[in-house]
Image (cartoon, helix red, strand yellow):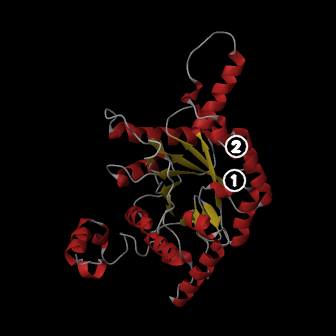
């Protein structure tokens, strides 16, 4: 079976790509990913706050003692919260490139326009084959309009694109008034790919200590439905590559994402649960499925079940929502208990 695919202009040996996760913080893990069949690896993210903090600390040491100030340094995350700093991140890319032959995709995570975006150039110089721009933004200001929010995404993308020559993908959240519109605008602004979707980690409350605390939940198979729907809708409407992420746990998930139009399928939670070698299982199962169903290549199935090509394009829209509600049988999906 021919598993090759193209993503961000890169020729990849398969659609199986580990996404940004703590696994890539270890160079040996990246080598294990390649050996297990990964066609590329997205590095863990370098955060805007890390770059801002480094700049602030440099300014602090250069001006220390010149004046007194009472501003709390805790406006920035403590350095200990970041496992590695910016220089270490760049060195990590260099070492990874020396260790493996597959493309290394650097990840830059931020939410505001600023000088930190030019750090993408240093990632390129360190050897990154492409850059994933993870714009993780939770707007809390009720006076901020959707137009302003979307324009911020476009401005950040343009800033990064002006600084690098390598391909740039934008990792989006699903929380837009019109996902198709922002996808089209980013496409026109020059993005080489869209990664759908970013999973916002929701906080929890510790009732014993009355504190808000982070609570990371790994994805389940149900999470794939959202990117599946939007990739199906966007396929053929934009020129950018499409990467599916979230909820991809087995070969059937991979096939579904490819059929709706994904160029690659990104893996995170399943590798954290099952281990890096699970990539081998996914590749083997994908090949077996293709052989059984007489598919010779990945490109043969890509987009075949997108809204553009499937027999029932309304299945991705409101009509199917109404049909689903009308045909649902409670007895087949619920367990009732007698009081």
Which circle marks residue 302 in the picture? none
Q: Quadrant of residue 56?
A: top right
| x then y, percent, for residue 50 | 62, 37
Residue at horizontal 28%, vertical 82%? 332
Q: Are marks 2 and 1 in contact (CB under 8 Å)?
A: yes
Instruction: Find the residue positioned furthest to the top.
Output: 67
| x then y, percent, for residue 48 | 58, 38
| x then y, percent, for residue 131 | 61, 50
Q: Quadrant of residue 22?
A: bottom right
- Label 1: which residue? 25
- Label 2: which residue? 84
As drawn, 146 above or below 310: above
Q: Earlier in the sequence, mark 2 or mark 1?
A: 1
- Determine the CA span between mark 2 and mark 1: 9 Å
| x then y, percent, for residue 296 | 57, 84
Dot 1 alpha-carbon crowd within 10 angstroms: few under 14, some 14 to 19, many 20 or more: some
Element type at mark 1: helix
Q: Nearer the viewer, residue 227 or 215?
A: 215
Residue at horizontal 36%, vertical 51%? 181
Residue 303 visible at all:
yes
């Amino acid at each position: 079976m021919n598993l090759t695919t193209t993503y961000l202009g890169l020729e990849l040996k398969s659609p199986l790509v580990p996404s940004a996760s703590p696994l890539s913080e270890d160079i040996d893990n990246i080598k294990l990913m390649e050996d297990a069949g990964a066609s590329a690896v997205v590095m863990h993210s370098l955060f805007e706050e890390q770059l801002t903090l480094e700049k602030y600390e440099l300014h602090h040491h250069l001006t220390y003692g010149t004046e007194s100030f009472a501003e709390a340094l805790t406006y920035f995350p403590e350095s200990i919260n970041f496992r590695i700093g910016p220089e270490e991140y760049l060195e990590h890319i260099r070492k990874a490139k020396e260790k493996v032959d597959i493309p290394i995709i650097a990840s830059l995570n931020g939410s505001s326009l600023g000088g930190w975006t030019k750090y993408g150039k240093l990632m390129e110089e360190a050897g990154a084959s492409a850059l994933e721009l993870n714009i993780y933004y939770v707007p809390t200001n009720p006076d901020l309009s959707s137009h302003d929010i979307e324009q911020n995404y476009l401005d950040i993308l343009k800033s990064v694109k002006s600084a690098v020559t390598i391909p740039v993908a934008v990792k989006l959240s699903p929380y837009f008034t019109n996902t198709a519109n922002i996808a089209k605008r980013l496409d026109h602004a020059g993005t080489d790919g869209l990664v759908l979707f970013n999973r916002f980690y929701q906080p929890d409350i510790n009732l014993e200590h009355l504190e808000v605390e982070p609570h990371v939940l790994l994805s389940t198979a149900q999470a794939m439905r959202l990117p599946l729907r939007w990739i199906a809708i966007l396929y053929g409407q934009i020129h950018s590559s499409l990467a599916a992420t979230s909820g991809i746990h087995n070969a059937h998930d991979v096939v579904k994402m490819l059929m709706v139009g994904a160029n690659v399928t990104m893996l995170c939670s399943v590798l954290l649960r099952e281990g890096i070698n699970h990539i081998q299982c996914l590749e083997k199962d994908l090949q077996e499925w293709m052989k059984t169903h007489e598919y010779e290549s990945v490109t043969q199935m890509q987009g075949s079940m997108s809204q553009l090509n499937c027999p029932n394009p309304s299945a991705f829209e409101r009509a199917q929502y109404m049909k689903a509600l009308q045909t649902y049988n409670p007895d087949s999906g619920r367990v009732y208990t007698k009081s």
